[in-house]
Amino acid sequence: MILYENNSARLLNIIKWGNNPFKKFVSTSEIKEELDFVKSREGLINRIKTIVKEDRNFILPVIGEVGSGKTHLYWALKNSLYYYNTFYISLESVYKKFFYNIYSEFIEKLEIAPLKFVVNQLCENWGALERKYGFFQVVDIEKIKKTAINQLSAKYSEIEPEILKDAITGITTHQLDPYKKIEAERWLLGKLLDAKELSILNITHDLHKGKNAYVLLRLFIENSKLGTILFIDDFEKIVGISNPQDDLVEEVFDPSWLYGAERSPNDIASEKIFSKITQLQNIDGLRVIITLKSIDSLEQIKKKYQDIDSELLPPIKEPIFLENFSEEDIFELYKSTMRNFFNNIECNEFTKEFENNYFPLNSTILKNVFRQAHGNPRVIIKTLIRIFNEIIEDEEDLETILKNYENLTTN
């Protein structure tokens, strides 16, 4: 009993030093989510994994209300699908330079080693293993480029020859020309190049020109050994992209609206972004997961696809619904988070000590938090953060603080 009381006081002191077990909660794609995925959602993860493994091209809608854990789902999928390059975009942050921003996210998650492997494989497919004979055996780069053009022209028939030539030149130069390798690598990584640097590479545009980024994105995804999953959050924002800028004439803004056209810049931006998204479906091996807040949003999206081309509808899978937590989930989440906390502060003895209780909270508080949040994961976690912050910051004793939450009323 004395040991228990000592451990309780010890844990409480550690927390009061400013250690909030839930402080690492995040809801963005930039910082890795450290909270575990509750068991009630394991079936959902397994269902998505099955779809990913059985189909190479699809759009899978995931529907869940605000705070239901859609971004958390991204991290769970990224951690579960080891052999897939899973990357995340938000339409709000990429619409200005759509293909360039998607390509940048793809490359960042793919990393350099797999990228170099794909570049090497492409060059070998185009004949890089064949060499001119002589005192020094060298490759015939111009012959390899010509072979690449012949191989890709039919499959990429909608791509302008100049754009396709730039992509082939950038890839072959990086792999086969040691004197220009560094410049070519900067081009492949999407760096901004000046006219002199582009001239050295004999390339017309860098990847800030969207069509160049698109063709490279397609080449790398279709020839990568890793599968590719694009996770697009809050997809319904496509029907209301706002604030297009004047300097985006080529990408999203049509100045004809200023001269009496009935459509607003927002409508034009939305249509053009949607058109670009439909181009992604031409990429073999690209699996797309979209998140939406309601089934009504999905119906609007389907209608937009129907208006463009009814043949685009079949790749849209039946939606998966991300339900709120069950009451059991909050207890599982709490226990799991506290175990991780004990491990992080190197006090694993607490795991066994507090295995059968919820100190410094209790089951009544956790039930009240669940009910007041109506099972919404984000609200649950933010409430737990607030409780622990009060324990850390308030001078009142623990019992007084907890009484306020034992008497919570459900809205």
Image (tube, rainbow, N blue to C red):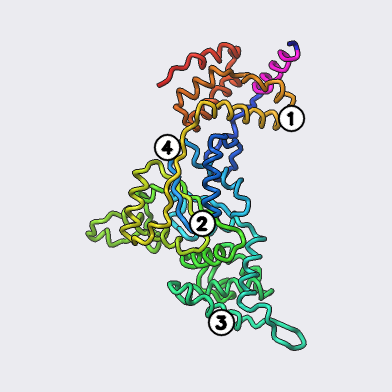
Q: CA distance from mark 4 to mark 1?
A: 37 Å
Front-lying residue, 265 or 150: 150
Q: Quadrant of residue 128?
A: bottom right
Decide: marks 4, 2 in contact (CB < 8 A)? Answer: no
Instruction: Determine contact: label 3, label 2, CB under 8 Å.
Output: no
Answer whether residue 258 is magenta in the image: no
- Tell me if I can see residue 28 in this picture: no
Q: Nearer the viewer, mark 4 or mark 2?
A: 2
Q: Amino acid at mark 2?
A: Asp
3D distance between C-alphas at marks 2 and 1? 43 Å
Query: Dot 1: what SS?
Result: loop
Return the mark for residue 346. 1
**In this rendering, is residue 349 above or below 1?**
below
First in sequence: mark 4 or mark 3?
Answer: 4
| Contact check, label 4 and label 3, Cβ < 8 Å | no
Look at 46% across and 67% down and name the residue there.
Answer: 211
Question: What x and y, as percent, mark residue 109?
Answer: 59, 54
In the image, the segment drawn in magenta is 3-16
The Cα atoms of the two marked residues, 4 and 3, are separated by 52 Å
Dominant SS of magenta comes to helix
177 lies above or below 22: below
Type of amino acid under label 3? Lys
Residue at 47% in and 29% down:
375
**Which callout, 2 or 1, points at the residue further toward the start of the chain?**
2
Which residue in the structure is indicated by mark 3?
146
Give whichever of discs 3 and 2 has the lower sequence position: 2
Q: Which residue is mark 4?
A: 65
Mark 2: few/some/many CA within 10 Å (<14, 14-19, 20+): few
Q: Is residue 327 visible?
A: yes
Q: Secondary structure at mark 2?
A: loop
Tell me the crowding category of disc 3: few under 14, some 14 to 19, or many 20 or more residues within 10 angstroms, Cα based.
Answer: few
Q: Which mark is residue 300?
A: none
